[in-house]
Image (spheres, helix red, strand yellow):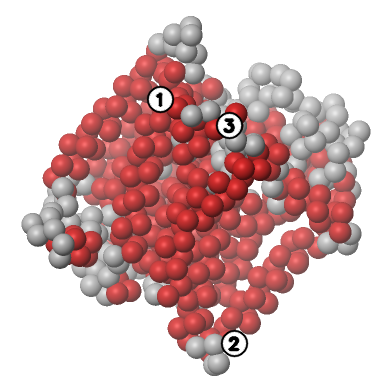
Amino acid sequence: MMKEWPSMTIVVLIGLTVRWAVSLNSYSGAGKPPMFGDYEAQRHWQEITFNLPVKQWYFNSSDNNLQYWGLDYPPLTAYHSLLCAYVAELINPDWIALHTSRGHESDQHKLFMRSTVFIADSMIYIPAVVLYCCYLKETSTKRKIASAFCTLLYPGLLLIDYGHFQYNCVSLGLTLWAVLGLSHDWDILGSLAFCLALNYKQMELYHALPFFCFLLGRCLKKGLKGKGLVLLVRLVATVAAAFALCWLPFLTQVEQTLQVLRRLFPVGRGLFEDKVANFWCSLNVLLKIKEILSPQTQLMFSFALTLLSLLPTCVKLTLQPSLQGFKYALVSCALSFFLFSYHVHEKSILLVSLPVCLILNEVPFMSIWFLLVSTFSMLPLLLKDQLALASVETTMGFSLACAASFSIFENLSEDELQLKPFSTWVKRYIPGFKVPAKMLKAWFLVSMTMMSLLTLMSITLEPPHKLPDLFPVLVCLVSCLHFLLFLIYFNIIILWDHKNGKNQKKIN
């Protein structure tokens, strides 16, 4: 592995440079009182956690107005905010002064906030990416470096964390550490890392079912009367201890626990909020489901459709646990949650993008296509944050890096797309069937052209007076259609997978 480090060092330095360049741009809610945006939300959480007792963090009070960016992330996020607040207090106490710091904006504070993301990213996410790529099996050194390079340049995460302003690098980084642990049969460490990710951001539930099914499948494979039972007990004990430690201050009273849960899962917000590229928001363009169905019915339909869409994947992974199947299941389940679950945010597509980065080496063409669409799907949000130029530049840079690293149009075949088992199965019933691999090139070019034109129109043109949301709605519809097709594709790979990936050819 030592021969990869010089090149990996250069890759990391380029990734860090691009991140800092993006951070020089605007952020969510800049100069937009009274609520500002996510930047202010993160600053406000530092103010609350530093100035109020732990038991008041999630409760409404005169000092903690939950209508003004009330804390609605799990305890580990709150602890992270508190840690940042201690540093902020040492530099400038005015940044986190109770009440008087509301809406604070300055160049010095922006530098501090950007630095907190940069440091967290450098400590958690980037090392996990590098190690994951270095330990890829049956992969050339060149391909490992290419995977790390493209993953670190993925524009979606850069634009949200360093532009819009969030700390997705922490939860996604912890999830990647969990995948690393399971990849090397370190099930306890993998479970611990994922518990921390789940306690940092509740949306990591998108990945929870694949983790559970994969570990349960491993235990069943070992046998529940011997090593499997021992492993299961250890895993349960690890998960319980991690959750208990994170939630300890909130477990002293039942009302405390319930209040945190109410804040984490606010079902009263409705089926969807902004223009999100998921099934429900897209369907609402044709059928006003929010007006036709009651909130309870919406919740029921959302739960049922989400469960049905991910059930085959989870059953297959439990019965036939394999590392390759686990990575594809992470993609499929996260995409099912994004498309069909309740009250999804546009930024939640990042939870699908991370596992797609994990299979970038295996199916580069489809993975790169998905990552470009996922960034495009957040275009309305990015334009609102005045990140148009940053979006175009990072997307173009990512596209060029991927084209140079993977040569995605070369040797595009059923094998390269991991569709040979599916094609063989279909030929039993439809002789002569062939996956239209060559047509995918044309579809890809049409897709890129469509997204480029919509991006250009969204930036340069004013929508019709009677249709003020025309461009955001078109972005959502186009993205959602892509995501539905990707969901079908990834499920086909999972359900018609080779036996534990034994027949997977070596990728050079």
- Residue depth check, mark 1 versus mark 3: number of the one nearer the observer: 3
Residue 173: give x, y in percent of width and height. 53, 55
Whole-number angstrom distance, CA of label 1 to CA of label 2:
52 Å
Which one is nearer the viewer's eye here, 274 or 153?
274
Q: Are marks 1 and 2 in contact (CB under 8 Å)?
A: no
Q: Secondary structure at mark 2?
A: helix
**Label whose residue precedes the other's in the sequence (3 or 2):** 2
Element under disc 3: helix
At a point 61% along the width and 68% down the height, the residue shown is: 192
Q: Are marks 1 and 3 in contact (CB under 8 Å)?
A: no
Does the rendering let one see residue 41?
Answer: yes
Residue extending farthest to the top is: 465
Q: Secondary structure at mark 1?
A: helix
**Residue at image mark 3:** 292
Nearer-the-camera pick, 472 or 194: 472
From the image, tell me which residue sits under label 2.
230
- Residue extending farthest to the right is 62
Kindly identify the amino acid type of the residue bearing the numbered disc 2.
Val
Closer to the observer: label 3 or label 2? Answer: 3
Is 179 on the left or on the right of 28, as rendered?
A: left
Report the amino acid beneath label 3: Ile
Residue at the image position 41 percent from the left and 27 percent from the top: 475
Residue shown at 50% from the left, 45% from the top:
340
Where residue 451 appears, x then y in whole percent?
33, 28
**In the image shown, does 482 or 204 lie closer to the viewer?**
482
Q: Quadrant of residue 39?
A: top right
Residue 393 appearing in the image: no
Q: Where in the figure is residue 164, as x and y percent of width and height?
A: 56, 32
Q: Which residue is mark 1?
A: 474
